[in-house]
Each structure stands twice: as C-alpha cells, then as structure tokens.
Amino acid sequence: MTTSDSVNETTTSQKAQECIDKAKQFCFAAYVLDETVHQDRHYEIPILNEDDALLHRARLIDLNSYLWVPTLTAAAQGLEHLVKACHYLNGVTPATSGAAGHDIPTMLRHPVCTNLHSRIRWQAERVAKELRTADYKGMITHDVAGDVIIEALLVLAQLQAKNQLRYTPRERELAPRTPLVVKTLFRVSQELGAFTECFITEG
C-alpha cells in the first residue's frame, strides 16, 4: 500500500464516521420530535401583543401540525447520511454536491446499500409489531412492513431530493407516516454506529 492509498483510506474512513455521526444525530432528533408529538398532541405557546413587546396571552397549538414537516426533514437528513455512510464504508464515494448529492433514491438503490436494506426491513418489522401491540391506529402488520418501509423511504427520499420538505409542498403531496419511518431509522442509525461491520457488503 502506498502512502497515497493510506491517506485515501484514512480520509474515506473519516468521512464514513462523519456520516455515521450525522445520521445518528438527525435520526435521534426526528425520534425525539415524533415522541413529543405523540405524547402530548397540544402545546401552549405565547402570543405577542400588538406592539410585539410583551407576552399577552397563550393559545394551544396542535403539535403535529407544527412538528410533522420538521420531523420528516430530520428523518430525511438522517436517511441521506445513512446511505452515504454505507457508500463510504464500502469504498464508494457518493455524490456530495448539487442535485446528485441529494439524490437519495439513486444512492439507496446502489448495491452497497444491500445490507442497509436488510437492516431497515428487519427493524421495520419489529417496529410495526410493537406499534400494533400499542394499538397505534392504522399501523400495518409486521409481515408487510419490510416492503412498505422501503417504499416509504423512497417517497421520503424524493421529497428531500425535490426540496419539497424545505419549501412549500405540492398540494395533496403524500408523505410516509412518521412513527414507522422515524423509529425504524433511529434504530438502524444506532445499529450503524455500534455494528458498522454489518453494513459492509461482501464481494
């Protein structure tokens, strides 16, 4: 191995770790937001008086209406870093700038993400079973969760790639339900940090 090869390998390893750290941070943020929404659906916020100087009164807001998009945004950022981490771990440099740098669907379909797919499916099945046990309304059965989660993440990835989460969404734009997506991504991000070798594709 030449000095140049050693430097490149070190740089790739550092970038992989940076992506792992960011994936854990964003997925945890999404998890906390989602937990907040479902523990207490309403929250009291202060309102300024006409002079915008003094707090005048307070009103209740529906947390879901305020936090749903930020939750999805954090989840999408976490997904992007999960995918890029898997690329770096498997010796593939992902696109990092322009539209290609946010093209999660294309990166997610790359062969280096095969093990990531498997872990996402497995965790989604566990999460779906737990949510149904907790009587979460409308939750899918665990036996179809693997297929549903991949499709949901591709939808989330498209929203991220097209800036629909950062800007005004299209009317009737569909987005995945947050608990299944968020809890699954959170668990996978924790796995990625603790068992990195499981995300390295052999061959």
Image (tube, helix red, strand yellow):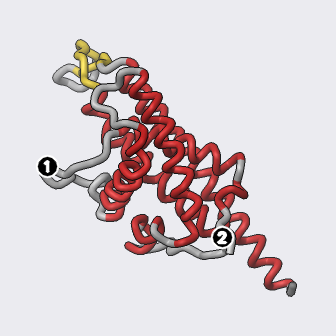
Residue depicted at x 47% and y 65%: 108
Near mark 1 (Cα within 10 A), the count class, few <14, some 14-19 or many ≥20, is: few
The numbered disc on residue 90 is 2
Q: Is residue 134 above or below residue 71?
A: above
Query: What kind of element bears circle 2?
Result: loop
In the depicted view, which residue is nearer to us: 158 or 127?
127
Circle nearer the N terminus (2, 1): 2
Q: Is residue 163 above or below residue 135?
A: below
Position of the N terminus, as image quadrant, is: bottom right
Question: Residue 23's x, y, as percent?
Answer: 56, 51
Query: Which percent across, then down, holds residue 33?
Result: 43, 32
Question: In the rendered structure, which amino acid carries the disc numbered 2?
Answer: Asn
Where residue 113 sits, quadrant-wise, is bottom right
Q: Is residue 65 left or right of residue 181?
A: left
Residue 61, disc: none
Lateral position of residue 182 relative to residue 18, left or right: left
At horizontal 41% and vertical 32% (from top left) the residue drawn is 34
Separation of residues labelled 2 and 1 (CA atoms): 38 Å
Left or right position of 106 against 114? left
Dot 1 falls on a residue whose secondary structure is: loop
The residue type indicated by label 1 comes to: Arg
Q: Quadrant of residue 143?
A: top left
**Quarter of the figure that contains the C terminus:** bottom right
The residue singled out by tag 1 in the image is 172
Please give the name of the residue rendered at 24% of the width and 17% of the height, measured from the top-left corner. 60
Select label 2 or label 1 by which is in front: 2
Q: Is residue 45 visible?
A: no
The single residue placed furthest to the left in the displayed view is 171
